[in-house]
Image (spheres, rainbow, N blue to C red):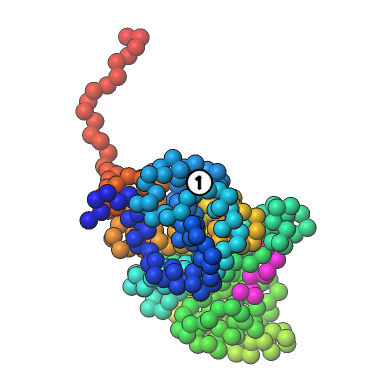
């Protein structure tokens, strides 16, 4: 079926051009465009992500050297660094943001039945942000500090499959806690956040939406203990209390009861104090839930290490957001391929294989399965001693 098709072309078949064109039409992306469409722009940027291209000239040279193959890879316009730079600058970044959300919805449906380590039926989200540092003289619009610029990638990660369900890109000065205001809280879901999100007005909004949260307390958080529950201290749980906030302003912001759990992490030799509005789950499982928040940190680390979002191909806000959203699309695309093809390989391994096989023409499944992980047997032959 895939005879004559490059690996890159087979990859792009997993993307719905119908949905992509709906996004393009929504924002008039191809208005008065004759030769280099939004789809061509997406393909160029996707190629750059998959093959670790570092500059516009790098992209141009690598694609033009294989110009005879470009038509069969889906390109319909001539690839030029000036044309690509202009497209990144003026084509609305929301086109690629909306298309990434289409892919996210598809991926979440595929991973909805994925087993979760803590055996919870509820959807569990981890909310956090990652700062991408920028040069102040080149990116003056990305306000952060007096000496440098930055953008923040706020991510609500679905821990069932580690799929980003919500991504919001802001300048570096936007405080993390403000992002809760932009979330549509899902009833019955569990939201795991760190101390940066400890705002009782917003936590009470989560509670009133019939959802649950798990967070850590700050040193100045004052509570009044109402009663304590029996705990098994061999599990690391030191106390499990039902409390109310003591400070008048905090009590006004969150008038209901809270659950306070003190836990000792034997591995890190660290004492942690959690706050949650979930009174049903065992205290030990609450601690394990917070530990699973580390998955969002691993997501940020993976994206920064293996996708091109630390060096940008344009200085405008539109170009930066376009590149980040296309990078997210590639991450989700690889996750979709992994699930649809039932591959046991990690996302990292799949990405590495794709990076060196995009112009080859074997079936995609064969290409992703061609590495033999078994060690070669030693045939007993040894190298002779040169000085014997």
**Is 366 placed left or right of 35 in the picture?**
left
Residue at the limit of the structure toward the right, as seen here: 146
Along the viewing direction, whichever of 325 and 20 lies nearer the viewer: 20
- Residue 83 drawn above or below residue 379: below
- Residue 310 drawn above or below residue 104: above
Q: Quadrant of the C terminus?
A: top left
- Residue 233 at least partly seen: no
Place residue 387 in its image quadrant.
top left
Measuring from the top left, give residue 13's x and y in whole percent: 34, 60
Measuring from the top left, give residue 154's x and y in whole percent: 58, 67
Along the viewing direction, whichever of 182 and 1 lies nearer the viewer: 1
Q: Magenta includes 178?
A: yes
The residue positioned 65% from the left and 58% from the top of the image is: 316
**Is 318 placed left or right of 350 in the picture?**
right
**Is 241 placed left or right of 371 in the picture?**
right
- Residue 359 at least partly seen: yes
Which range of residues does the magenta coloring cover? 172-179
Q: Report the residue marked by disc 1.
A: 59
Place residue 113 in its image quadrant.
bottom left
The residue positioned 57% from the left and 66% from the top of the image is: 92
Disc 1 element: helix
Along the viewing direction, whichever of 347 and 367 lies nearer the viewer: 367
The residue positioned 57% from the left and 63% from the top of the image is: 91
Q: Magenta includes 72?
A: no
Q: Quadrant of the N terminus?
A: bottom left
């Amino acid at each position: 079926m895939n005879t004559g098709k490059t690996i890159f072309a087979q990859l792009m078949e997993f993307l719905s051009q119908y949905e992509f064109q709906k996004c393009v039409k929504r924002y008039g992306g191809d208005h008065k465009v004759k030769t280099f469409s939004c789809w061509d722009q997406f393909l160029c940027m996707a190629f750059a992500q998959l093959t670790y291209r570092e500059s516009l000239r790098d992209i141009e040279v690598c694609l033009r050297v294989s110009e005879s193959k470009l038509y069969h890879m889906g390109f319909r316009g001539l690839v030029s660094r000036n044309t690509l730079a202009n497209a990144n600058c003026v084509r609305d970044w929301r086109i690629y943001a909306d298309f990434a959300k289409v892919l996210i919805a598809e991926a979440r449906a595929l991973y909805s039945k994925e087993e979760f380590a803590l055996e919870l039926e509820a959807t569990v989200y981890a909310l956090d942000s990652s700062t991408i540092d920028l040069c102040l003289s080149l990116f003056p619009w990305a306000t952060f500090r007096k000496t440098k610029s930055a953008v923040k990638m706020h991510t609500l990660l679905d821990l069932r499959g580690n799929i980003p369900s919500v991504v919001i890109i802001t300048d570096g000065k936007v405080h993390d806690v403000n992002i809760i205001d932009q979330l549509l809280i899902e009833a019955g879901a569990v939201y795991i956040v760190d101390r940066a999100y400890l705002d009782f007005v917003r936590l009470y909004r989560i509670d009133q939406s019939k959802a649950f949260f798990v967070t850590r307390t700050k040193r100045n958080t004052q509570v009044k203990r109402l009663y304590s529950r029996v705990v098994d201290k061999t599990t690391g749980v030191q106390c499990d209390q039902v409390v109310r906030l003591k400070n008048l302003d905090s009590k006004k912001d969150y008038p209901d009861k809270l659950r306070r759990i003190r836990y000792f992490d034997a591995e890190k030799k660290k004492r942690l104090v959690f706050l949650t509005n979930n009174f049903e789950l065992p205290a030990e499982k609450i601690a394990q839930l917070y530990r699973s928040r580390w998955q969002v940190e691993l997501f940020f680390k993976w994206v920064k290490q293996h996708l091109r979002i630390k060096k940008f191909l344009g200085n405008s806000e539109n170009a930066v957001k376009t590149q980040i959203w296309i990078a997210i699309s590639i991450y989700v695309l690889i996750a979709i391929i992994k699930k649809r093809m039932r591959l046991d390989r990690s996302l990292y391994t799949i990405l590495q294989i794709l990076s060196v096989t995009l112009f080859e023409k074997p079936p995609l499944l064969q290409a992703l399965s061609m590495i033999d992980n078994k060690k070669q047997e030693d045939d007993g032959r040894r190298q002779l001693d040169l000085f014997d």
